Amino acid sequence: MEQSSTKKMSEPPDVDAQRIPVTVVTGFLGSGKTTLINRILKEKHGRKIAVIENEFGEIGIDDGIVFNSQENILEMNNGCICCTVRGDLIKILKKLWKRKNKIEHVLIETTGLADPAPVAQTFFVDDDVQEHYRLDAIITVVDAKHLIQHLDDDKPEGVENEAVEQLAFADKVLLNKVDLVSAEEKQEVVKRIKAINSSADIIETVQGNAPLERILEIKAFSLERILEGEPTFLESDGEHQHDSSVTSVGLELEGEMDMKKLDSWLGAILREKGTDIFRSKGILAIKGTADKLVFQGVHMLMGFASSSEGVGKPWQDGERRVNRIVFIGRHLDRKQLASSFTACLAD
Ligand SMILES: Nc1nc2c(ncn2[C@@H]2O[C@H](COP(=O)(O)OP(=O)(O)OP(=O)(O)O)[C@@H](O)[C@H]2O)c(=O)[nH]1
């Protein structure tokens, strides 16, 4: 007896067991990050999960369509998590561990244009953060249909290709939207992923349906592996250049929309400009119904959902019906988008 208690006393404390695991969910615009996080939150995981959510675009849309039953959602929408709001990320993390109602897992959703490296670096360069958190894994969600075009996107000198960076840093790749590609197309995408990152496990998913035990608390992040590929990982100050040709136009307009006009307007824009418009989404008020309409576009693919199907909440009595829509991509014509959006208002 005595022997075993002496042994116990001399054992180092299990530091990892005391630190809160963090999963960074990254992946290009529209790949399915929010879908994955919503799915995780809805499952019976038995953990108290906090989500830190960073959205790209002039106006945030995700807050209105997701996570509506969760209290532990922290929004950071005043810049990109990998540069301007990294200080805010540290502040939020510090606040979180001081909460009485102890958090057991943190999910960080980066914007679709973020470089995950500075986010990962946060867990190794700040002493307080390092003491309380452990980076469990970087999960990169990939849109099987659109990945290759983003990997092949020509970037200006000195600008990183975000889709490549996101894959290079992945501990797990969720090859999402496999329902949209053929077996041959899928094989080609897998080949491209492996050429960038041969060590990450690839999980094929539809609507982010990966088993939780393969994505949470998996201790997959390895600093050694990262340092092998990027020896200066811990030294750099997180400074990097974003592709400034990708911008966003966010529009807000009070009133009720004509569904027919809206549908044909969005259909036409995405058909004509869907190569340049990477992502579009909106929350809309339609004449004749109190249900909120949620619009989602990824390049030329678009779809609607409604609060009648449990996505978001209906317009409440007295709530101002403000339509919000955001377009993210290249060569966006703000004036033209604004006037054609206004033209969709119901008479
Ligand atoms: N066909 C298909 N559509 C999917 C799948 N997963 C997600 N989607 C749709 O893809 C669109 C974008 O999904 P999100 O989860 O919002 O993507 P995201 O990565 O969070 O997008 P951003 O945060 O704006 O970059 C939505 O319309 C989803 O319903 C899938 O497996 N198959």
Image (cartoon, rainbow, N blue to C red):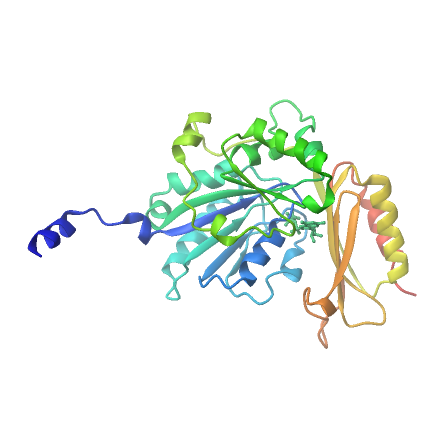
**Camera-nearest residue between 285 and 42:** 42
**Camera-nearest residue between 333 and 103:** 103
Q: Position of residue 113 (x, y in %)?
A: 62, 40
Q: Position of residue 65 (x, y in %)?
A: 66, 61
Q: Position of residue 269 (x, y in %)?
A: 85, 45
Check the image and name the residue furthest to the bottom.
317
Check the image and name the residue furthest to the top.
157
Check the image and name the residue furthest to the right.
347
Image position of 145 (left or right of 335): left
Q: Position of residue 39 (x, y in %)?
A: 58, 58
> In the image, what residue occupies the spot 86% across and 49% down?
267
Q: How many numbered discs, if any? A: 0
> In the image, what residue occupies the spot 38% across and 57% down?
97
- Quarter of the image for residue 145 reads top right
Image position of 315 (left or right of 110): right
> In the image, what residue occupies the spot 61% across and 34% down?
162
Image position of 213 (left or right of 194): left
Image position of 40 (left or right of 296): left
> In the image, what residue occupies the spot 29% across and 48% down?
15
State the quadrant of the C terminus: bottom right
Q: Is residue 32 above or below residue 244?
A: below
- The answer to whether any part of residue 23 appears in the image is yes
Q: Is residue 292 above or below residue 206?
A: below
- Quarter of the image for residue 190 reads top right
State the quadrant of the N terminus: bottom left
